[in-house]
Every structure is written in structure tokens, then in C-alpha cells.
Image (cartoon, helix red, strand yellow):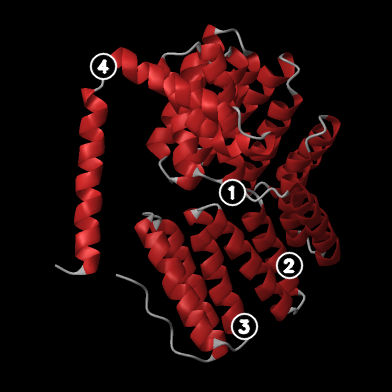
Amino acid sequence: MSTRSAETAYLFRHAIVREAAYELQLPAERARLHGAAAEVLRRAPPEQLEMLAAEIADHLRAAGADTTVELEFALRAARYAVANYHHDDVFRLMQRVTEIGSPENVFEARQALYTWQRRHRSDAAAARYQAMELFRFGRREDYAGAVAVALNGLAGLTDARRACRLHRRAFRVATRAASEVAAGLALGNLAVRKIQLGDHRMAMRLLVRAIEIHRRAQNPAGVGYYLVTLAGEQALSGDLPKARRTAEEGVRILRDLSAKQYLPVACGKLAGLVAKAGELDQAAALLAEAEQMALEISSVGDLADIRVHRALIALSNGRIEAAQRHWADGARLLLELGKREALKRSQDEIAEACRQAGVPVFKAPE
């Protein structure tokens, strides 16, 4: 047997022995040991507690400790996991928070679970479940802000026309509840759907109003995100210099916040405006930055779009081999995600870019 095989066999047997030894302990003794382990870990230096919070919460739960103490560490661990994009821990810990947390904690946890299911697992069904749970929770607890956020979440999972109705309803609910962030989110997302429906004049007005609400609510992430969206509408109206300034302001705000969940899209949109100004190398650098952030946060949907965009910029810049590589990667991801309509649009864009570059049209994945 090779050394590696021997090590693997030992580790396998060791795990089985460890599990068997654990199961042989009486439940009361296991609980006592978990409690002792949690107590030891809680004595760690304060700067280490964030990293140890998940382990402490697990030990407290297994020890049958007071859920108030467990909740403290479960929340700390869950927020640490969100901030550092530790996806498995986010799901596990936020789900536990929904079981033992206060209404405010449950609101926070359901929002996080919806976002992670939609953006990081691309699981629309699971995201819809979380939005519906948040909606039911908001109705049950008479928590209008939660209802508004849930309606916004559900709107993101349906067609544009139905989404518009849900966003309007979310705005009315949020306004009555004086929940400015939820109201700004509803108006901003309504604007995005109006863009999809071709109503650009209305979208522009809604975006300006959404940005004003987010500024008033002191929510810079919302300001930055919708500024970048507004920049796209300004570009369509023909004012490219203004559009670029608006997008640069939005990206700057999001960078200052280290808002990695928004930056891949924001940098991609700014790259498009920079490319229109003929600054292809800077556009390529922005897309490389966007791709790196999408990889860091495991946002596969953003990653697919960015790689297709990188292929288009590389074609415009005469970098054919790089363009082929980016296209193959982006198209494969779109296919794996089941985004066939997006893949078809991307194929058409790539074919036109190939013709303009005077090279054979890149083959699409099968």
C-alpha cells in the first residue's frame, strides 16, 4: 500500500472510530462536554471570537444551553459568514437564527437566506420559499417592513409586468410603514423592470427618486447601486460623459463600502461606458476586477456575464485568443445555469463582434 493510501485509510478509520466513540457517550455526558468546550472557546481573545463564534454556537446548541446565549454567537457567526462569503455557514447559521431569534433577527436572517439562495446558489425555488416565509412572518408579526422586502424579493423572481405590480405594492406598504430603505428598493427595482419593458423615461424618473430616498435613509449601498443603473439610462439618452461620471460615482461609493455583492455588476456597467469612449484597456481592467470579485463571492451568474463581456472587449481590442477563452468560459456557465435566452443573446452579440473583427464566428457550446 502506498504512503498516501495508508494515510487515507488511517484517516477513514480514525473518523469512524471517533464517531463511534462519540455515539457511545451518554447524552448527558455529551452535553456536558459540549458545554465545557464552549466555555473554553469563549475565553479566547476578543479578536478571535468572530472566527470561533460558529463553533461556539454549535457546542452551545449540542449542550442544550440557554438559547439566548446560543443566539448571541449564532448571530455573530452568521454575520461573519455573510461578510466573508462563507456560504455553507450562512445557510446553516441563518436558518438557526430563524428558529431562536427575535422578530428583528428573523427578518435579517430571512433576507440573508433569500439573497444567498438567489445570488449564490441560483436556486429560484429556494429563494421564493424564503421570500414567502418572510412574507408570512411579516403578516403574522404585523411587521410591514418585512412584508415590503418580501414583496420586492418575490418580484425579482417573476416576469417584468407582474414584478411591476409587486414593486408598486411593496412601495405602498413600505411608505405606510415609514421604511425608507424598503421604499427606495421598491422604486429602484421598479425602474429596472421599466427598463426591461422599454419605458426608459419612467425608469429615469424612478431611479432619481430612488436615489434620493436612499440618500435620505443614509443607505449608501442603495445610492451607489442605483447610480450605476441610472448611468446606463443616461448613456441611452446620448449623454455619455454624464453617464460615465454617474457610474464612476456609484462605483466609488460601492468600493468605499467594500460592497462586493454589487461591485461585479457595477464595474461591468462602468466598463461598458469606458469601452464606448474607446478606452479598451481600462475597460478590460475593470472587467478583470469585476471577475475577481465575482469569484471571491462565488456569484456564478455575474461571473458568466462578465466573461462574455470580457470576450466582447477582447475582440474589439484584437485579442482573439483571449476572446475565445472568455467566450468559452462564459457560455459554458450560462449553459450550466440554464440561462438559454441569455446565451442566445450573447451568441448574437459575439457573432456580430466576430464579423466586425474579421474573424470566424466563435462556436457556441452544445
Query: Of helix, strand and loop, which one carries label 2?
Result: helix
Q: Is residue 113 left or right of residue 277?
A: left
Instruction: Decide: few, some or many residues near mark 2? Use Cα within 10 Å; few <14, some 14-19, many ≥20.
Output: many
Q: Which residue is mark 2?
A: 273
Tag 3's secondary structure? helix
Q: Is residue 38 something one can see in this rendering?
A: yes
**Mark 1 or 2, which is nearer the eye?**
2
Instruction: Assess whether mark 3 and mark 4 are in contact (beta carbons under 8 angstroms).
Output: no
Point out the tag, 4 or 2, that comes first from the N-terminus: 4
Q: Which residue is mark 4?
A: 26
Label located before the other in sequence (1 or 4): 4
Q: Residues within 10 Å of mark 3 (few under 14, many from 20)?
A: some
Which residue type carries mark 2? Leu
What residue is disc 3 on?
316
Tell whether label 2 touches label 4 (CB within 8 Å): no
Instruction: Determine which residue is flagged by label 1.
Output: 196
Please report whichever mark, 4 or 3, sits nearer to the chain's N-terminal start.
Answer: 4
